[in-house]
Image (cartoon, helix red, strand yellow):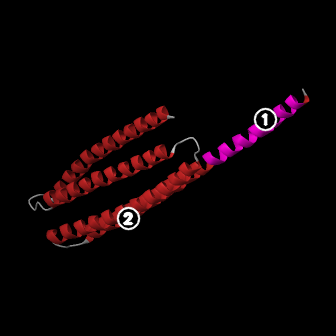
Amino acid sequence: MKRTLIVLAALILALPLQASAEGRKHRRNNEFRQATKSKIEAYREQQKAENKSFRESMKSSDMPQDQKLTAVKEHRETQYGENIAFHEQLHQERIAHLKEKLAQNKKLSDVQKQEILDHRETQYQESLAFYAQRYDENMRAIDQILGNERLSPEEHRIQMKEFRTGQRKENKEYRQAKREENKAFRQSMRMKK
């Protein structure tokens, strides 16, 4: 009887320690997500500021249309390169964090862990390809719309706005499809446990 009471007391005392360890894991994951989210928001704000100052410099410039077109394309190329580098850095940080989490996970097999890493890498490569295609479409639209000298500046602005509105919708649909793929992948991994 005494032994049973001692075992029960030990279990009762151990439960808060286990819950505390789980809480620390969630806190670390949330801290990582928040830090990543903050980096992304800061980067986007920086890009917005750069775009705004670039647009202002183009408005105040009395540069010929062909030089403006070249400047716009160069600005887009620079930002695209910066975006690729930024997203590559984020991807590497996320993969390192995921590997750390997977190393601590004792429930998953090595095959399952590798499957998770492979899925994440595939998702990243597909996104790179999708956004590279978007970049190419943007550059063609810049050539077609802004390169059309028969259009007024207001017509250029309206057509570019219409183009970007369509692209935003497609981007949103792409991201939603990726979320659904990831959800299905997580479900399939849960079934394998």
Single out the residue that lies furthest toward the left. 150
Note whether residue 34 is visible.
no
Q: Secondary structure at mark 2?
A: helix
Q: Residue at x 28, y 51 (%)?
A: 130
- Mark 2, Cα crowd under 10 Å, few <14 / some 14-19 / many 20+, is few
Q: How many marks?
A: 2
Note whether residue 71 is visible.
yes
Q: Give the image location of residue 112, x and y in percent.
A: 47, 43
| Prevailing secondary structure class for the magenta stretch in the rendered image | helix
Asked where in the image residue 66 lies, by quadrant, the reply is bottom left
Q: Which residues are magenta?
A: 3-26
The kind of residue tagged 2 is Ala
> Which tag, 2 or 1, sits closer to the chain's start?
1
In the picture of the structure, the residue carrying the numbered disc 2 is: 85
Viewer-proximal residue among 88 and 163: 88
Q: Give the image location of residue 46, x and y in percent.
A: 42, 63
Q: Nearer the viewer, mark 2 or mark 1?
A: 1
Q: Secondary structure at mark 1?
A: helix
Q: Is residue 129 above or below residue 15?
A: below
In the picture of the structure, the residue carrying the numbered disc 1 is: 11
Asked where in the image residue 1 lies, by quadrant, the reply is top right
* Left or right: 137 as drawn, with respect to 149: right
Q: Is residue 142 above or below residue 103?
A: below
The kind of residue tagged 1 is Leu
Q: Give the image location of residue 176, x and y in percent.
A: 36, 40
Viewer-proximal residue among 182 and 66: 182
Q: Residue at x 12, y 57 (%)?
A: 151
Spatial CA span between label 2 and label 1: 50 Å
